[in-house]
Image (tube, helix red, strand yellow):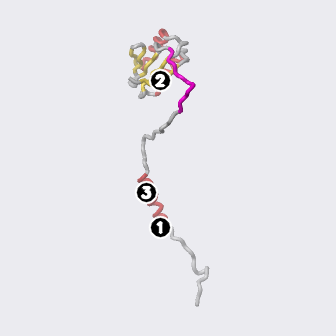
Amino acid sequence: MKFFTNKERALSIEITPLIDIVFLLVIFFVVTSKIETNQYLSLDLPTSQSFSSNLTNADQNIILLDSGTLVINNQEFDISQIEEVMVGIQASFETSETIILSIENKAYHEWVILLMDQLQGAGFQNLQIKTYTD
């Protein structure tokens, strides 16, 4: 009787079926995964007991609409004319009082930053921002 020795018989593992199964798993996970272009993060923001937002002077209210329109004292101005609008704001608003910026929720951030930058450059340091709804 002849026995096989380790020299004559080499062990080999076929990896072809393993590669097929791995590719099938990759295809399965790609097809079943949920791909969205708009991925929003839902936040539950904490509430505060000690902080309260007091509207000090409702006369110093500036409304920025999503169309780029600034509403100041029931007069409408375009955001592109911000330099001319700032002259009127400086003449009619007090720099020591709080200015309330009511921003419509679809207004561009660029406009908000431009408005805040112009107001702070003019000496208005107390700004409150709130979301404007009709």
Q: Earlier in the sequence, mark 2 or mark 3?
A: 3
Write down the quadrant of residue 11 in the picture. Answer: bottom right
Percent x, y of residue 45: 52, 33
On the image, the x and y values in percent for residue 6 come to: 61, 79
Could you tell me the amino acid type at mark 1? Pro
Q: Indicate which disc, 3 or 1, sits on the residue closer to the N terminus.
A: 1
SS of the residue at dot 2?
strand
Q: Which one is in front in this view, the residue at disc 2 or the one at disc 3?
A: 2
Whether 51 is drawn above or below 35: the answer is: above
Q: Count of labels shown? A: 3
Real-space Cα distance between discs 2 and 3? Answer: 47 Å
Q: Name the residue under label 3.
A: 28
Indicate whether residue 52 is drawn in magenta.
yes
Can you say whether 15 is above or below 78 in the image? below
How far apart marks 2 and 1 lie (CA) works out to: 61 Å
Reading the chain from its start, which is encountered first: label 2 or label 1?
1
Count residues near mark 3 (Cα–Cα under 10 Å), then give few for <14, some for 14-19, many for 20+: few
Q: Is there CB contact under 8 Å for labels 3 and 1?
A: no
Q: Read off the residue under disc 2.
A: 130
Which residue is rendered at x = 39% and y = 16% of the image?
A: 76
* Range covered by the magenta-colored residues: 46-56
For label 2, the crowd category at 10 Å Cα-Cα, with few meaning under 14, some 14 to 19 and many 20 or more, is few
Name the residue that disc number 1 marks: 17
Q: Which of 53 and 109 lies nearest the eye of the viewer?
A: 53
Dot 3 falls on a residue whose secondary structure is helix
**Placement of 69 over or under 8, stated as above or below:** above
Q: Which residue is drawn at 46% across and 63% down?
A: 21
Question: What's the residue type where badge 3 is placed?
Answer: Phe
Type of amino acid under label 2: Lys
Q: Is residue 70 magenta?
A: no
Q: List x then y, in percent, for residue 86.
A: 47, 14
User: Which SS type dominates the magenta stretch?
Assistant: loop
